[in-house]
Amino acid sequence: MNKPRITIVSYSWPPRNSISTHRPYAWARYWSKKGAKITVLTSKKQMFDEPLDMKLPELKDVNVIEVPYGSYLSPIINIFLKFSIIEKIGKWVRANPTKYIGSNYDPRDAWSLAVTAISTKIARKTDILISTYGPEAAHVIASKMKIINPSIFWIADYRDLWSENPRLNNASKKFKKNIKNKEIETLKGNADLITSITKVMAKRLSKMHKIPAITVTNGFDIDEKIVKKNFYQKKSNNKKNFKNSIYRYDIPKCK
């Protein structure tokens, strides 16, 4: 029996220090150990992806393809990225885009344009495809790969919600509708299965897309020695800090 060829489309990948990085990394690690042929399609990280200090072991027999997309960004965005202060402001604004700029624009979506040539080649050599949201570019890329190779079994993973994301609560009804329509059109007729981190999310997504959905929770790999090392590396003296804080304030005596 031939080894299953699995492609993971994920923006989050080491060294990006984010909870979302562990999910696809764990899949690649354990599926490759089970004998699958793994390809990871990710992006070259930008300044706004910092911190970029997650040092996880390089996975043997896992082909990681990192695609740069800086040239596909708006010239204005590229100018902004040269200044650290603007980068920090950008992170703050991007946390609630509809509140500050009235848009759901995400510069990471340019990745879907830059990756077209390589994703087309990979699609023809893929049996199982799993893309994990966000940004939305991950599902957009996977959708195009499925069109190129209809025999692919595509799993659309949601660690976070897309059109029903709480950060869009302040958006107008028209704006929300447009985002929802884009999400539905991206998965419609292409995705074979949806996975999400909770039963509630899985049920909501299955109802929206009329696609079977299952729950795949987040986990913690207790075998990762480097995670333990980082966890115990910096210890704070809570007792000392608490004691010092008491001396800084006048605490009334009990009568």
Image (spheres, grey):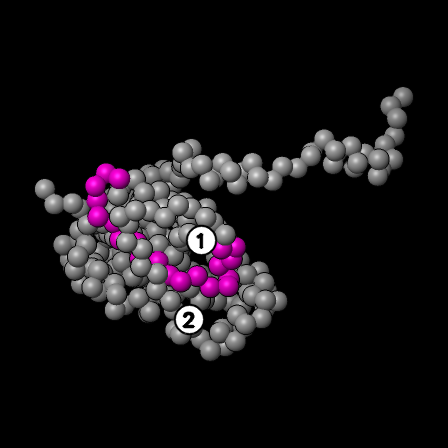
Residue 109 picture location, percent across and down: 39, 65
On screen, residue 230 versus residue 43, left or right, reads right
Q: Is residue 19 magenta?
A: no
Residue 192 picture location, percent across and down: 22, 49
Give the residue drawn at x 52%, y 76%: 79
Residue 202 to residue 98: above or below: above
Give the residue drawn at x 30%, y 47%: 60
Which quadrant holds the C terminus?
Answer: top right
Could you classify mark 1 by the number of other residues whose Cα lies within 10 Å: few (under 14), some (14-19), or many (20 or more)?
A: some
On screen, residue 13 versus residue 237, left or right, reads left
Residue 163 to residue 108: above or below: above
Residue 187 picture location, percent across and down: 27, 56
Dot 2 lies on which element? helix
Q: Which residue is mark 1?
A: 15
Give the residue drawn at x 31%, y 55%: 64
Of 39 and 250, which appears nearest the observer?
Answer: 39
Q: Which residue is mark 2?
A: 70
Of 96 and 48, which appears nearest the observer?
Answer: 48
Of 37 and 183, which appears nearest the observer?
Answer: 37
* Residue 149, quarter of the rendered image: bottom left
On screen, residue 127 versus residue 113, left or right, reads left
* Residue 178, quarter of the rendered image: bottom left
Give the residue drawn at x 88%, y 26%: 253
Could you classify mark 2 by the number of other residues whose Cα lies within 10 Å: few (under 14), some (14-19), or many (20 or more)?
A: some
Residue 244 - label: none
Q: What range is drawn magenta here?
A: 33-52
CA separation in Å, label 1 and label 2: 18 Å
Residue type pointed to by label 2: Gly
Residue 219 to residue 127: above or below: above
